[in-house]
Image: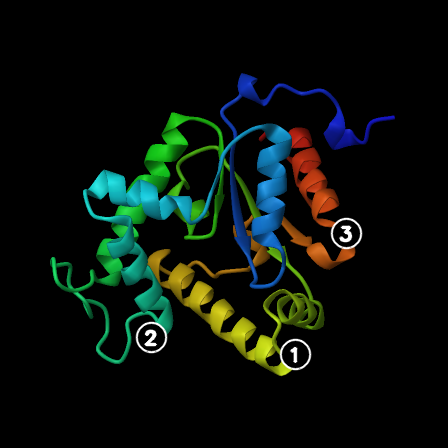
Amino acid sequence: MHLPWEEPYNVMDKHVIITIGRQFGSGGKSIASAIGANLGIPVYDQELIISAAQKSGLSPEFIKKSDEHRHLFGLGGILGLGRFWHNPGNLMDDNELFRIQSDAIRDLAGQGSAVFVGRASDYVLRDMDTLDVFIHAPLEVRKQRVAERLGITPDDAESLISRKDKDRRDYYNLFTFGDNWGVAANYDLCLNSSLMTIEEAAGQIISFGRSSGRI
């Protein structure tokens, strides 16, 4: 007997776009990968860096360095936006980085079905028919997952989770002009990943997407 999300289904009949927002340590990237594998469609996360670089003519290393520096020092920093203006020997500012990555997201979404992880992709693609999902889990569960995955203490895992979630919240809230990261009203489906396996979570999202007509 097939589970609901395992029934034969040809996703190629539709232009399916799924966006995944996620708390750090909730397994969101793994769930996105499982969705992509099940539906046979690409999943974009770090791949967006390469696509953005190709589209902008910049090297992937340059965009990755700018992206990592933004996370390292926090959005805007004490000097506000425009901290690192784009030039050959420096980094690009937050607005320019967001524009380049957003162009890449829209370009990839226009090419065919895909799953996008993070980077405010639900907002970037707000004019398209998308299935917007947010993955969350209790802090204690995420602490255990992160500690085991990275080989660090639970206390260090909690500190890392706090920093990563703040980065994601600040990035989303800044560039969506007031939308709130992780607030249920901004998504079609919010899922507690601690209640099921990665595959089951992916299946629940696919099942919801089919019943809602988004998949």
Amino acid type indicated by mark 3: Met
Please state which of residues 6 and 124 is positioned toward the viewer in this rendering: 6
Residue 196's disc number: 3
Q: Which residue is mark 1?
A: 154
Which residue is painted at 62% across and 47% down in the image? 31
Residue 103 visible here: yes
Give the spatial CA distance, label 3 vs label 2.
35 Å
Q: How is the image coloured?
A: rainbow
Residue 73's disc number: 2
Task: Report the residue that reaches farthest toward the front.
Answer: 151
Q: Residue 176: percent from the left, percent from the top?
A: 37, 56
Image side of residue 138 versus residue 215, left or right: right
Circle 1: element type: helix
Circle 2: element type: helix
Q: Quadrant of residue 76?
A: bottom left
Q: Residue 52: percent from the left, percent from the top?
A: 29, 44
Which residue is painted at 61% across and 76% down in the image? 152
**Quadrant in the picture for the N terminus:** top right
Q: Residue 107: percent from the left, percent from the top?
A: 33, 34
Image side of residue 111 versus residue 146, left or right: left
Q: Nearer the viewer, mark 2 or mark 1?
A: 1
Which residue is painted at 67% across and 52% down in the image? 191
Image side of residue 181 versus residue 49, left or right: right
Q: Residue 187: percent from the left, percent from the top?
A: 55, 49
